[in-house]
Image (cartoon, rainbow, N blue to C red):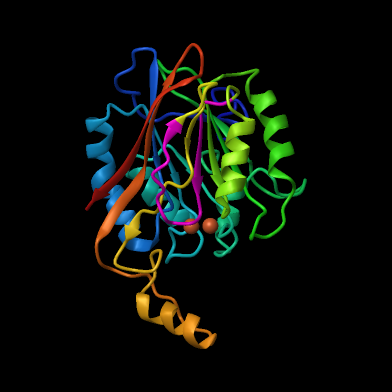
Amino acid sequence: MGSSPARTPPGETACPRPSGHYFGVVKLLFIADIVGQPGRRAVKELVPQLRQAHAVNLVVANGENSAGGSGITVNTAEEIFAAGVDIITSGDHLWDQKEVMGLLEGERRFVRPLNYPPGTPGQGSTIFQAQGLPPVAILNLQGRTFMPTLENPFHAALAEVERLRRTTNVIFIDFHAEATSEKVALARMLDGRVSAVVGTHTHVQTADEQIFPGGTAFLCDAGFTGPHESVIGREIEPIVRRFMTNMPQKFEVAKGRVLLQGAVVEINEQTGRATGIQRVSQAL
Ligand SMILES: [Fe+2]
Ligand SMILES: [Fe+2]
């Protein structure tokens, strides 16, 4: 997998760039589902500004819709990494492009939902290492309510968090799920054990950002990065027609009113507790 295992232990990700400002607080920018070319353009143009404005140490982005709105390829992932994203997570659109195998089999900066059955290619978590920063674990999980049935994400999360905490207590989770209750429940279960749980998948940003009593930051859904003059990123008319007629339609990625959405989370290095969470919704 890694080309230089002596310098980058398995499951860990080397950082190609300096980590920026760092004073015992880790600042993580999470970017919600990047949809198609407009989403990638927003990342390319806005990530450098956001990195600077928020003194961000690392950037995590959900890339499950980055290739034409469905799935991800090696090329789209490269474009996203080149724009300043350190780690890419995914979700139920993981398999939409066959080229994803190139990422699952060889890219340590790419994470898929952990709770696929044993033997599935890829990794459900990674540990980001950068000079001057504590190790930061990134974990991706997928919900099961109104979604394809995977392994139970609650049991998978408990075991994996326990394992990751042997290395670091700075742990960020992208929980890719449909139901708000499932997302709140998982985050409540993990309160005090992880730094943040941020939801993705609905493409609708919620306004419930908060820090639970144990120190876990939470946002039910971070929204999506792409064209918002749309129905969750797609052209409006075909979606309306589909709801009205039940007939199959081609859903093209929309174009208008591109926003980068997500959240900035501040985490205390020593305790792993979140000290802040702020929603991001910035126009291109
Ligand atoms: Fe999804
Ligand atoms: Fe998505």
Q: Give the quarter of the image for residue 183.
A: top right
- Quadrant in which the N terminus is drawn: top right
Q: Is residue 161 above or below residue 219?
A: above
Q: Which of 274 and 170 is in front in this view?
A: 274
Q: Kindly tell me whether residue 73 is visible in this rendering.
A: no
Q: Which of 45 and 258 is in front in this view?
A: 258
Who's the residue at 22% across and 38% down the image?
A: 49
Total residue callouts? 0
User: In this image, 6 relative to 51: left or right?
Assistant: right
Find the residue positioned furthest to the right. 118
- Which quarter of the figure has residue 168? top right
Residue 100 at what x, y percent from top left?
Answer: 56, 56
Residue drawn where x is 63% and y is 25% of the image? 164
Picture residue at 48% right of the left edge, 35% below the top: 218
The dominant secondary structure in magenta is: loop
Residue 31 to residue 203: above or below:
above
Placement of 113 over or under 278, stated as above or below: below
Residue stretch rendered in magenta on the structure: 194-210
In the image, is residue 227 above or below residue 173? below
As for residue 111 lying within the magenta part, the answer is: no
Q: 131 or 192, which lies in front?
A: 192
Residue in the picture at 73% in, 45% down: 152
Whole-percent x, y for residue 121 in the image: 68, 49
Q: Does the magenta stretch include residue 200?
A: yes
Horizontal side of residue 50 vs 178, given as left or right: left
Q: Do we see residue 252 in this rendering?
A: yes
Residue 15, x across and y down, in percent: 43, 29
